[in-house]
Image (spheres, grey):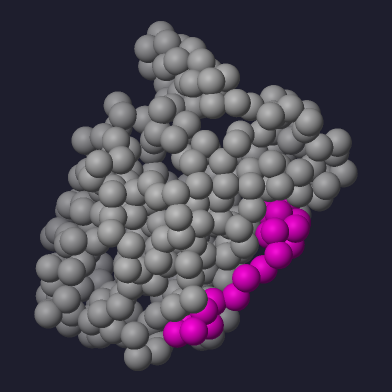
Amino acid sequence: MGLNLIEAIHKEDWEIFALYLPGEDVRYLSRFAVHMIVRNILNMDSLLKAIPEEVDAVFHLAGDTSTWSKNNDRQYRINVEGTANMLDAAVEKKARRFIYTSSISAFGFHDGPVSEETVSTAMQSGVNYHKTKYLAEQEVKKRSGKLQTVVLNPCNVIGPYDRINWAQTIKTVYQDKLSGYPPGIGTFAHVKDIARAHIQAAEKEVVGKQYVLGGTQASFQEAFDTIAMVLNKKPSDKALSKSMLRVATFIFKLKSLIDKKEPMLSMEKYKRIVGKQIIDDRKAVKDLELKKTPLKKMFEDSYRWLLQEDLLKK
């Protein structure tokens, strides 16, 4: 998401200061004319040295998206304490606005539509990522009197520069390794649409507000079939039931205990792919002019980028 935002604001001739972790892969970031600064959001002193005085906007997109409970402590430090540090640094440096990229996961699980008014069940969800994103939002709200803030909650984001999330599903289909499709429903958004909404949040009179950023609703079967169509592959005709996926979750958990690696399917991931994610994003469409790119276009753009970067066989 961060690289797409940088690409979008770079085209608008902004001066950009991009923070990244020591040792992080910056092959794509270095393609843009930005001030590249090595920093760690867990180190307050380093943040104060990195952020210029009175910047127009601080976009905070850094986060730990792990769904493995073994990483819970690290995830809390990065998502909650790191966000608090970024907020305090922005206050200290008199930043004009702070845009926090949260997640639709901060609302927890719901069977019906999720809007900005939905009461979060994150703390009861059993998923640490949900909890930490919700708690980070509370850190934003605590400082709303000292800083102009906007909270954004994207859903499933698809598009260029993704090598980890939906890119893995595209690669699985490309390599003919897809075992089937899960029973859940999701909402999918083109990363370019989400990046544009971030810029609108920085420029428009929406201070103190929160926006769920939706897109195109589809079942996972529709999403997987669309990927197959884009790749000119035969769609899977195998539905993965909840019981099958629970067994697979247990097997992957046992495997992770042996090899000490994050399981391909954790209980947290299981809950996501069998649930419903329905987004009422009318507020973002009205205030931030959120666009809704068709599902096929999202996966086409993601696939073309992976092909261009020769990442599909790796």
- Residue at the image point whose x is 42% and y is 11% from the top: 254
Q: Nearer the viewer, residue 50 or 138?
A: 138
Residue lying at the far bottom in this picture: please name it: 205
- Residue 46 percent across, percent down from the top left: 19, 59
Within the magenta stretch, is there residue 230?
Answer: no
Q: Which residues are magenta?
A: 285-303
Q: Nearer the viewer, residue 129 or 304?
A: 129
Q: Nearer the viewer, residue 267 or 177?
A: 267
Relative to 113, does residue 67 appear above or below in the rendering?
above
- Residue 89 percent across, percent down from the top left: 17, 69
- Residue 103 percent across, percent down from the top left: 39, 57
Relative to 289, does residue 194 appear above or below in the rendering?
above
Relative to 85, does residue 89 appear above or below in the rendering?
below
- Residue at the image point whose x is 18% and y is 61% from the top: 138
- Residue at the image point whose x is 57% and y is 47% from the top: 185
- Residue at the image point whose x is 38% and y is 38% from the top: 66
Relative to 233, does residue 27 appear above or below in the rendering?
below
Within the magenta stretch, is there residue 302?
Answer: yes
Q: Magenta stretch: dominant SS? A: helix
- Residue 232 percent across, percent down from the top left: 87, 44
Asked if residue 226 can be seen in this view, the reply is: yes
Residue lying at the far front in this picture: please name it: 112
Quarter-of-image position of residue 294: bottom right
99 displayed left or right of 27 = left
247 displayed left or right of 192 = left
Asked if residue 41 can be seen in this view, the reply is: no
Q: Nearer the viewer, residue 301 or 93?
A: 301
Q: Quadrant of the C terminus?
A: top right
